[in-house]
Amino acid sequence: MTDKYAVIGNPVAHSKSPAIHAAFARQTGEDISYAAILAPRDGFRPVALAFRDEGGRGLNVTLPFKVEAFELATDLAVRALEAKAVNTLKFDGAAIFGDNTDGVGLVRDIQDNLGCAIGGKRVLLMGAGGASRGVMEPLLRERPAALVVANRTPGKAVALVGQFTKLAGLSPLRVAAQPYDALGGAQFDLVINATSAGLANEMPPLPHDVFAPGALAYDMVYGTDTPFLRFARAQGAATADGLGMLVEQAAESFYVWRGVRPQTRPVIERLRMQESGAGIPGGDA
Ligand code: ATR
């Protein structure tokens, strides 16, 4: 019997996840269906549980429901506990397993697809919301030389860094919070935009000299050339949007559900060819 999966969000019509998972299913021969479910903003829980009760095996969860999915889960992966958010639910009888594949998706795209090793690098992460929290631990796990979190509201970056300094047991020298206007002079090999600024055609107030020679600028938004990516290109940095992260997080969810790891490269290449200016966060299935 075909196993049912879906992505649940609001809005969800833009989602590329059904096409991605259909491609994974064809590639691996797994017998699954994958739909998109629009839940009312105040109605995540009943819609998710109704899907489960009708035989659904798992859900990808996108904005604005990742924290509610975290609360719905009866068992949590460590990476979901640390992110305090869930983008993957797996139903098994009465148990609801919650996982978060966004961070590993980002790290795999940067390292495996874009060929930029994170270990030993100076990394600047912009933003201190849910998108940043979801990628902190997977980035730290790669042992960058430094991970600096900058945010428009500096107190949120301080709180985020405090949470992960404790959790990862790392020296505070390796991970720090800094306001944008205190970055002057510091250079980074990898600059990641985890803010939602690009969706409003804006960018964080980043100094010009922040990119080290050969730096990679990564925007977790996909489908649009954000002001941050244009700025980075003008400074001579290599650039990437979040499409690869989207496909990698999907592949990890597929693995969580099916125990089979699909190949991501052909799927990324096909989506690139079809790209249509959506402007969606890459961790946002
Ligand atoms: P998400 O869960 O996607 O991270 P969020 O929790 O609303 O969404 O966080 C959005 C992030 O983008 C925040 O870090 C926000 O900065 P503030 O904490 O100061 O609000 C950041 N952000 C949004 N628009 C921005 C802009 N124009 N310039 C700089 N940062 C911006």
Image (cartoon, rainbow, N blue to C red):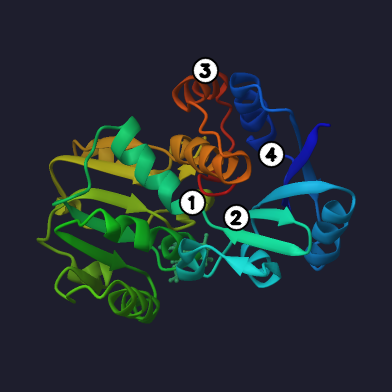
Q: Sequence order check: which comes first, mark 2 or mark 3?
A: 2
Q: Residue 26's spot in the image, x, y percent?
A: 65, 20
> Is there any visible trace of residue 205 in the rendered image?
no
Q: Sequence order check: which comes first, mark 1 or mark 2?
A: 2
Q: Are marks 1 and 2 in contact (CB under 8 Å)?
A: yes
> Alpha-carbon distance for marks 4 and 3?
17 Å
Q: Residue 139's spot in the image, x, y percent?
A: 31, 56
Q: Which residue is mark 1?
A: 102
Nearer mark to the viewer, of 2 and 3:
2
Residue drawn 65% across and 21% down?
Answer: 29
Secondary element at image label 4: loop
Residue drawn 84% across and 58% down?
Answer: 47
Q: How many marks?
A: 4
Per the rendering, the mark at residue 87 is: 2
Q: Which residue is mark 3?
A: 273
> Alpha-carbon distance for marks 4 and 1?
18 Å
Given residues 3 and 166, the one toward you in this image is 3
Q: Sequence order check: which comes first, mark 4 or mark 1?
A: 4
Q: Sequence order check: which comes first, mark 3 or mark 1?
A: 1
The kind of residue tagged 3 is Met
Q: Is mark 2 within 8 Å of ligand 1?
A: no
> Is there any visible trace of residue 75 in the rendered image?
yes
51 relative position to 158: left or right: right
Q: Sequence order check: which comes first, mark 4 or mark 3?
A: 4
191 relative position to 195: left or right: left
